[in-house]
Image (tube, rainbow, N blue to C red):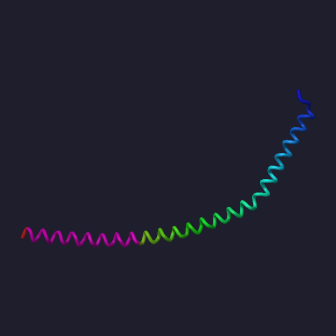
Amino acid sequence: MPSIDEAQARLEAALARLEQAIAARRAQAPAADVALVGEVEGLRDECSALRERLANAEARHARLKGSMTAMGGRLDAAISELDSLVEG
């Protein structure tokens, strides 16, 4: 059975490794943060561009819908006129 001193030594060694790992991670964090900030800025730019494209598509859709409504009315009128001519 291991002694208390051996267990204490293993615990201290494990804590030292954990502290080293944390320190290494903290050292890498600034570089990762810079990359993340750049990626977020890129995504914001892309989002703005997509919003603009969506607004343009919605405006075009509204124009086409208006045109289709007008054309539908004209077609209905033409069909009614043809029905009147056929029925005579």
Q: Quadrant of the rendered structure where residue 35 is?
A: bottom right
Most common secondary structure along the magenta stretch: helix
Q: Residue sitting at 48 percent across and 70 percent down?
A: 53
Nearest the camera: 15 or 31?
31
Which residues, given as a range, are shown in magenta? 60-86
Q: Is residue 36 above or below residue 53?
A: above
The percent coordinates of residue 16 (x first, y second) are 86, 46
Nearest the camera: 77 or 29?
29
Give the farthest residue toward the right: 5
The percent coordinates of residue 2 (x first, y second) are 89, 29
The percent coordinates of residue 72 (x first, y second) are 26, 69
Give the farthest residue toward the left: 88
Question: Magenta stretch containing residue 62, yes or no?
Answer: yes
Left/right of residue 68 with respect to residue 32 in the rendered view:
left
Q: Quadrant of the rendered structure where residue 81 is?
A: bottom left
Left/right of residue 10 with respect to residue 37 in the rendered view:
right
Q: Residue sitting at 47 percent across and 70 percent down?
A: 55
Quadrant location, the C terminus? bottom left
Give the farthest residue toward the top: 1
Q: Residue sitting at 93 percent across and 34 percent down?
A: 5
Nearest the camera: 22 or 73?
22
Question: Magenta stretch containing residue 57, yes or no?
Answer: no
Q: Residue sitting at 17 percent across and 69 percent down?
A: 79
Left/right of residue 16 with respect to residue 54 in the rendered view:
right
Give the tally of numbered discs: 0
Left/right of residue 8 with respect to residue 18 in the rendered view:
right
Q: Quadrant of the rendered structure where residue 80 is?
A: bottom left
